[in-house]
Image: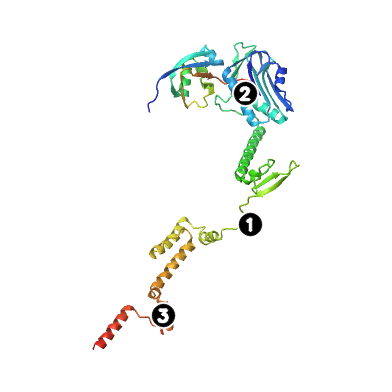
């Protein structure tokens, strides 16, 4: 089975502390279309200066939490990935 | 109806109440989360809320769906969260529910606020008097990051908590046991019965119970499904088989039982009798039948296999009736021929 190693352009959203560190609330990012979620997170941490909170983040893909960072995710052009620090609503 | 909103303005409690009113509801439970002026001794100047709006609304919708599954009697649900700067002692979140009776209303609101704090992507930043940079808070209920939790309570409280946990687990196991034990009958007969019949079942007797009319608590036994007990006829042959085969050899090792079977198998092989499964009695019967068959088709067989002592004992009785062997007969005939031939 041929593995699709093409790259896609996705939108990344930053909130709370991650927004302050990345100095933006929104950015475009190019990444492989199929990869492990943790890999994507590490790339974002490196690229957007999120090292100080790297252990506290999770991701959301198209408004759904990625429960297990060790699973593979399939990204398409224009998908929305959100960097989510620990929440404090309510 | 579900009312979900993220808003930047002051929350109007009266408006919320209007959303909850319904003729069928006797209870309305409202939780208001208000901003505090202190945290761990530090004075809070202002609080600011930020949200991943689309996803927050989606998650709040999921909470409503969850509430309706767990408390089906709920009528209206309101989840409002204020965003932006919220001055101290003003309302930042409202969770409210209306229902015919108060238990559903109270419990669902309690559940919902815990859920909101653990999964809705909203963040709060507190700015303190002495530290103007501010700090992003994290809820205790938030499941990430996955940290170890240190429980700082005294021994008696710790013991109490452990006891409560054990009790809860015990009750849970009991519930599952009862659930597994009960077998709700899928009889088509029950389908014909009236609508007022409630399908209850008692775990001990597996009977189906019916609510007695005009009574809130009395139940009538309609049908009993009883698989054991004196009225059930046991399978005698299988019981007997178990007694004759297993009883004496219960304490023996596996090897011994193998040995016993192999001796029987040897006999069966020698006699050219096919082994008839596990039933020892049947197998012995088959062997006996084979012996009888062999005796019937060749009468000398009986005398050939008799032991020496038996022959001696039978000799006095058998002298009157003599049995001749075929070769002896041959000899006799040839002797006669020779005599007559001469």
Front label number (1 vs 2): 1
Disc 3 on helix, strand or loop?
A: helix
Residue B226 seen in render: yes
Front label number (3 vs 1): 1
**Dot label at residue B231:** 1
Disc 2 on helix, strand or loop?
A: helix
| Residue farthest toward the right in the current orientation of the protein | B214
- How far is the residue under mark 2 from the one under mark 3? 102 Å
How is this picture coloured?
rainbow
Query: On the image, which quarter does residue A39 sit in?
Result: top left
Q: Which of A55 and B291 is in front in this view?
A: B291
Which residue position holds label 3? B312
Dot 2, crowdedness within 10 Å: few (<14), some or many (≥20)?
many
Mark 3–mark 1 CB contact (< 8 Å): no
Q: Earlier in the sequence, mark 3 or mark 1?
A: 1
| Residue farthest toward the front in the current orientation of the protein | B192
């Amino acid at each position: 089975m041929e593995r699709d190693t093409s790259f896609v352009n996705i939108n990344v959203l930053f909130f709370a502390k991650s927004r302050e560190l990345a100095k933006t609330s929104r950015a475009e990012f190019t990444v492989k279309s199929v990869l492990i979620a943790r890999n994507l997170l590490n790339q974002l941490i490196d690229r957007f200066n999120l090292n100080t909170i790297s252990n506290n983040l999770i991701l959301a893909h198209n408004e759904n939490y990625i429960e297990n960072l060790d699973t593979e995710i399939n990204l398409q052009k224009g998908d929305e990935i959100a960097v989510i620090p620990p929440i404090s609503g309510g | 109806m579900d009312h979900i909103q993220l808003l930047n303005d002051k929350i109007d409690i009266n408006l919320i109440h209007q959303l909850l009113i319904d003729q069928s509801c006797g209870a309305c439970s409202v939780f208001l989360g208000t901003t505090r002026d202190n945290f761990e001794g530090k004075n809070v100047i202002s609080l600011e809320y930020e949200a991943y709006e689309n996803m927050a609304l989606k998650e709040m919708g999921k909470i409503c769906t969850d509430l309706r599954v767990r408390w089906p009697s709920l009528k209206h649900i309101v989840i409002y969260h204020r965003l932006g700067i919220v001055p101290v002692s003003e309302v930042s979140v409202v969770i409210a529910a209306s229902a015919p009776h108060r238990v559903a209303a109270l419990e669902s609101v309690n559940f919902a606020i815990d859920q909101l704090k653990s999964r809705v992507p909203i963040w709060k930043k507190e700015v303190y008097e002495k530290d103007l940079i501010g700090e992003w808070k994290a809820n205790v209920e938030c499941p990430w990051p996955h940290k170890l939790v240190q429980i700082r309570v005294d021994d008696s409280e710790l013991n109490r908590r452990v006891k409560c946990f054990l009790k809860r687990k015990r009750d849970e196991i009991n519930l599952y046991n009862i659930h597994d034990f009960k077998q709700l009958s899928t009889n088509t007969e029950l389908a014909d019965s009236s609508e007022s019949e409630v399908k209850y079942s008692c775990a001990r007797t597996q009977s189906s119970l019916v609510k007695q009319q005009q009574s809130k608590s009395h139940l009538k036994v309609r049908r009993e499904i009883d698989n054991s007990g004196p009225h059930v006829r046991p399978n005698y042959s299988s019981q007997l088989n178990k007694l004759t085969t297993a009883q004496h050899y219960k304490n023996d090792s596996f090897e011994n039982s193998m040995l016993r079977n192999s001796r029987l198998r040897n006999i069966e092989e020698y006699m050219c009798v096919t082994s008839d499964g596990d039933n020892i009695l049947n197998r012995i019967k088959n062997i006996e039948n084979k012996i009888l068959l062999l005796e019937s088709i060749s009468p000398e067989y009986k005398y050939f296999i008799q032991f020496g002592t038996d022959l001696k004992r039978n000799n006095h009785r058998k002298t009157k009736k003599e049995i001749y062997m075929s070769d002896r007969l041959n000899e006799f005939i040839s002797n006669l021929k020779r005599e007559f031939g001469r």
